[in-house]
Image (tube, rainbow, N blue to C red):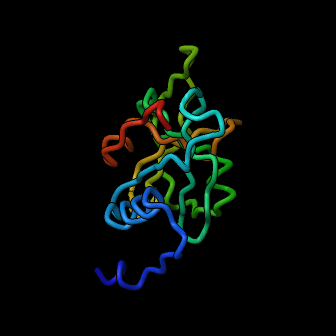
Amino acid sequence: MKILNETHVPGKITVSHLENISNKIFEFNWITFSDDDLPLEDIEHNRALYLIVKYEDSVVTRVLVDNGSSANICPLSTLNKLKVDDESIHKNNICVRGFDGRGKDSVDDIMLDLTIGLVEFTMEFQVLDVAISYNFLLGRPWIHVAKEVPSSLH
């Protein structure tokens, strides 16, 4: 109620927009999307779902949500950019299989504390030394912990 009482609401606002604002306030532990988040082509698209997350004081863009991945993936280049301490990285013998069925040995694994929206997650990532188009891939391990369901609607 304190937040609602202190929130500035413009005089010229639609009921729908006000509803979106209040829903976001009440759902502070959820990651939500509204119609404002839809791409220009509306719901008729097949774009991947990317999020922006925070790691310590850094904002990380191009975080792919992939419900087809059985692991959370972190490229080694992302850890280097974030200047992650080498002591927090642990060796492992995991082989990650890609879409083509070929395997790639995981360099290491790491536990990372990420903030997505207002929610904090501590997640294990498989660290791969590969060139890929995303900075993190959040797979089914994150999806289940976050109780998120990727949807083609957004």
Instruction: Describe residue 110's horizontal placement relative to residue 78 as left or right.
Output: left
Residue 115: tell me if it is visible. no
Numbered disc total: 0
Q: Position of residue 30 (x, y in %)?
A: 35, 56
Q: Position of residue 16 (x, y in %)?
A: 44, 56
Residue in the image at 31% along x and 41% along y: 144
Instruction: Describe residue 141's horizontal placement relative to residue 82 as left or right.
Output: left
User: Which one is nearer the viewer's eye here, 91 or 83?
Assistant: 83
Outermost residue on the top side: it is 101
User: Which one is nearer the viewer's eye here, 110 or 100?
Assistant: 100
**Residue 104 image-quadrant placement:** top right
Can you say whether 6 is above or below 139 in the image? below
Residue in the image at 47% along x and 51% along y: 110
Residue in the image at 31% along x and 65% along y: 26
Can you say whether 58 is above or below 128 in the image? below
Residue 104: tell me if it is visible. yes
Q: Position of residue 74 (x, y in %)?
A: 56, 45
Residue in the image at 58% along x and 71% along y: 57
Which quadrant is the N terminus positioned in?
A: bottom left
Can you say whether 95 is above or below 54 in the image? above
**Residue 102 image-quadrant placement:** top right
Q: Position of residue 46 (x, y in %)?
A: 58, 26
Instruction: Describe residue 54's horizontal placement relative to residue 71 as left or right.
Output: right
Instruction: Describe residue 45's horizontal placement relative to residue 94 as left or right.
Output: right
User: Which one is nearer the viewer's eye here, 126 or 13?
Assistant: 13
